[in-house]
Amino acid sequence: MVYFERGSENDEISYEEIKVALFSVFDHLGSPKKILVIPPDFTRKHSVAGEITSFAYEYYKSNITDILPALGTHAPMSREEIQNMFENVPVDLFRKHDWRNDIVELGRIPADFIYEISEGRVNFSWPVQVNRLIIKGGFDLILSIGQVVPHEVTGMANYNKNILVGCGGAEAINKSHFLGAAYGMERIMGRSHNPVRKLLNYADNLYLSNLPIVYILTVIGHNANNKLVVKGLFIGTGIDVFEKAANLSLKVNFQLFNHPLNKIVVFLPPHEYKSTWLGNKSIYRTRMALADNAELVVLAPAVERFGEDETIDYLIRKYGYKGTRATLKAVNENSELQENLSAAAHLIHGSSDGRFKITYCTSLLSSDEIKSVGYNFAPLSKMLKKYPPDKLKQGFNIVDDEEIYFISNPALGLWAAKEKFVE
């Protein structure tokens, strides 16, 4: 059921209009006594989920007893990040999702189903795992909040991914990521219908249908003045609300070029990107736009590590971004990768498979560290002088008589050339 829908490529929805829409829906929902809110974490601050959560708290007050950011494998939010993102919401309402331990398994999706939807690429069962609080908390209403945008694992982010992956367990996250990588990221990104989404929808229908989940989905894009604005707001309980948001996101967040590009420069905003695990959105989201032998320059002022936790960081350092073939071989030969398939999927996603050059520019990881995982290195200070993010415009620029395409934040879209976009 869709309670509210508004959005178009040219729309700009103000915070006050969002608040009015939310309060209208909340009036319709009645008077739930115990409410769980599931927003994204600080790495998705631009989703406006912080403001929406604040509005929800303003309306429901003490009936909101718990807020569980959908961390997935990301590092827990700090107190400062919570206060920055969720204005006027008590910090003591926030819970940390422990994706390795604090989960319950509701059932398993059989291997033959996954073998079929993956076209024979993988053959394992999949656990339906979610944070214990979601199942055991006794909630009358669960508000799942987030942005719909092209995504490298699920095609289009959010909806039940927020529950089954963002609040999922290690095995579920590992296997869903590996399913997407094995099927082919370039066959998934920007599509709301794909094997990973089929898996999530199947699990949703079987195991989540009795939960009182209402989805609040945003679509974010740039206006004519290159300012980020809310282009769409969709609120409801089923897949229709997701499909409406996904259709708009594809219009707003997907840039299709007539020809492949020879150089793309991506800036990773320091408040958002502190690891290549997150920063490699610069690779995922642009790979289909880059010509063979092109260069991707990643300006990464705050990237200080590879993984979001010690285990993943160790695996990235050990195996590196060496390409699909090398990674699959390493998975077959090493149990530590078999037990961390999301890391293996990430290694595949983060490689160009030798098709284009990737140059990471940071001052917090050494040249040797960057090169050891398979990337080229350039000093951040030198590259910031050449490509100053505050002076480049989003899109095409001329720098030293060379045409470059500049992206101010890779999380906000998907870029592809017509000949590279796989139908």
Image (cartoon, rainbow, N blue to C red):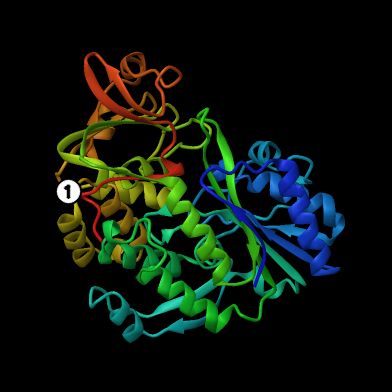
Please tell me which residue lies in front, 203 or 324: 203
Where, by quadrant of the figure, is residue 132 drawn?
bottom right
Point out residue 120 in the picture as x, y percentages from the top left corner. Answer: 23, 78
Looking at the image, can residue 421 be seen? Answer: yes
Question: Which amino acid, mark 1?
Answer: Asp
* Residue at image location 75% in from the left, 47% down from the top: 54
Q: On the rendered structure, is 256 left or right of 99?
A: left
- Residue drawn at point x = 86 percent, y = 68 percent: 31
Along the line of sight, the residue nearer the viewer: 327 or 237: 237
Q: Nearer the viewer, residue 102 or 42?
A: 42
Quick one: label 1, few (<14), some, or many (20+) residues within 10 Å? Answer: some
Q: Secondary structure at mark 1?
A: loop
Residue corresponding to mark 1: 353
- In this rendering, the answer to whether 40 lies above or below 102 is above
What residue lies at 51% left-to-right and 31% top-to-bottom? 224
Q: Quadrant of residue 112?
A: bottom left
